[in-house]
């Protein structure tokens, strides 16, 4: 019964990649306004989420924050990505079965569990500056928020979410 508990716990924690959603105990995105046109946006994944997926979902949230606040374009002022590595070990249990014959014991002991699993959880954070019109003479990538949103949602088959852009 104890092993079943650990199996269910492991499957629920590590069963599938972090979905694109607001941050919860399994990960997700966060954002907050630093000033009127500057925001910090982050995404934390679980052990089944790749760093590339976390970076894409962070970029998607950057586009949505841009649109939700009445802007059309954004640039990334600061970008940070990393991976948290950890380990967990399942509990070990031993079962011994045998018989005793005239003072002699013959039996078998089976040990279950005790495996150690290593996991990696990615996270990424962008500080962005938003613009209503496409800026000129900025020596960095200028992202079109509507195109970023559309392309990343299509890539991960996330469906449409209306953020004031007509569902584009």
Image (spheres, rainbow, N blue to C red):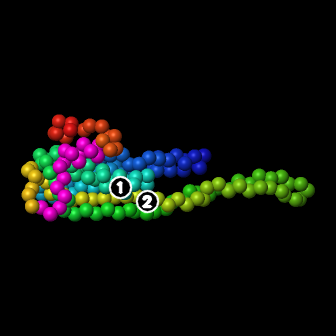
Taking depth in this image into account, of 168 and 127 the one nearest to the observer is 168
166 is within the stretch colored magenta: no
Name which residue lies at 47% across and 47% down.
15
Magenta-tinted stretch = 138-153
Residue ID for mark 2: 120
> Residue 92: x percent and y percent?
62, 57
Contact (Cβ within 8 Å) of mark 2 with mark 1: no
Give the residue pinned by disc 1: 52
Q: Position of residue 64 (x, y in %)?
A: 21, 46
- Residue drawn at x 56%, y 57% as measured from the top left: 90
Question: Where in the figure is residue 140, as x and y percent of width and height?
Answer: 17, 61
Q: Is residue 122 left or right of residue 88?
A: left
Using the image as rendered, state which of residue 29 and residue 57 is in the foreground.
57
Question: Total label count?
Answer: 2
Query: Furthest-right residue in view?
Result: 102
28 sits left or right of 110 in the view: left
Near mark 1 (Cα within 10 A), the count class, few <14, some 14-19 or many ≥20, is few
Quarter holding residue 40: bottom left
**Where residue 79 is drawn, which disc sits there?**
none
Q: Position of residue 4 (x, y in %)?
A: 57, 46
Mark closer to the chain start, 2 or 1: 1
Identity of the residue drawn at 15% across and 57% down: 129
> Compared with residue 128, is residue 161 higher up or lower down, i.e. above or below?
above
Residue 33 at least partly seen: no
Q: Note whether 122 is above or below 60 in the view shown.
A: below
């Amino acid at each position: 019964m104890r092993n079943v508990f650990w199996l269910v716990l492991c499957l629920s924690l590590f069963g599938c990649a972090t979905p694109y959603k607001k941050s919860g105990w399994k990960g997700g995105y966060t954002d907050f306004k630093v000033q009127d046109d500057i925001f910090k946006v982050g995404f934390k994944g679980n052990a089944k989420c790749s760093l590339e997926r976390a970076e894409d979902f962070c970029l998607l949230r950057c586009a949505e924050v841009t649109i939700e606040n009445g802007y059309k374009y954004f640039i990334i002022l600061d970008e940070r990505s990393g991976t948290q590595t950890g380990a967990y070990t399942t509990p070990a249990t031993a079962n011994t079965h045998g018989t005793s014959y005239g003072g002699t014991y013959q039996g078998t002991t089976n040990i279950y569990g005790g495996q150690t699993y290593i996991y990696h959880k990615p996270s990424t954070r962008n500080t962005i500056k938003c613009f209503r019109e496409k800026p000129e003479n900025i020596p960095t990538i200028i992202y079109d928020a509507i195109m970023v949103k559309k392309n990343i949602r299509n890539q991960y088959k996330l469906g449409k979410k209306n953020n004031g852009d007509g569902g584009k």
